[in-house]
Amino acid sequence: MLALFPVLLLAACAGSAPPKGPLATLPIPAEPANVDAHAANGAIWQPDTNVALFEDSRAHRVGDLITILIQENANATKSTNTTINKSDSINAGITSLFGIAPTFGLHNGTPFSPSLDASSAQKFGGNGATAQSNTFTTTLQATVVRVMSNGNLEISGQKEVMLNGGHEYIRVAGVVRAADISPQNTVSSTQIADARVEYSGNGSVYDAARVPWLARFFLSLWPF
């Protein structure tokens, strides 16, 4: 016990200590092109520089930033109803054989003729319904990673937030039409073509909601 006490004390201190070191930025999807410095010729406008006299601040070059307004609302409802009814009835009897009515013994003192009666009925009913609703709203800055030949912009951006020991990840990627970018340099996620919007995370909250691996194994084998 005396030997384990220092180990437990160090583990407690290590678990409660805040993270140290500088906060590193996430990888940048694309670097802007290098621009030349102003030539010392006294002119206001210089070619191949970052000076723009007659253009707005909307993203249009590789490395420019654009604000993505993620507004995803998905609602889906499906309902099915199936009913099947089937009934069969068979009646057969021998009333005459070569002009003679055949009889077999007596039943309650009366001769009876052979006959066959059969009936069956089947009924099946099935109902199914499913409903799903998802809402995702946030704001994210993305970077222009490629300018296509037709003027469309390929964008990519991500955000990482640490909350209570867990990390939240937001990622978006897709293609934006330059005409859909507002004067405030924003675009809605509903106007992104081939969009990929991801919201995920890790930590104790996600671990508590995750099915254990052994339970997932048995669920994959369970046929019912």
Image: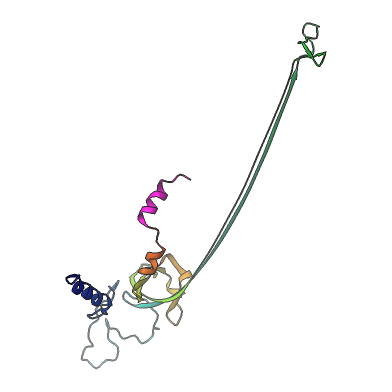
Q: Main secondary structure of the magenta part?
A: helix
Check the image and report above or below for 29 versus 47.
above
Furthest-bottom residue in view?
A: 42
Please say whether residue 217 is one of the residues in the magenta stretch.
Answer: yes
- Answer left or right for 122 relative to 201: right
**Lateral position of residue 199 relative to residue 117, left or right:** left
Residue 163 in the image: state x and y as whole percent.
36, 76
Residue furthest left as drawn? 3
Residue 89 position, x and y percent, is 72, 28
Location of the N terminus by quadrant is: bottom left
Question: With respect to residue 99, does 27 lie above or below?
Answer: below
Q: Is residue 49 left or right of residue 94?
A: left
Examine the rendering and report whether any part of residue 212 can be seen.
Answer: yes
Residue 156: % across, % down: 35, 70
Name which residue lies at 78% across and 14% down.
113
Q: Which residues are magenta?
A: 212-224
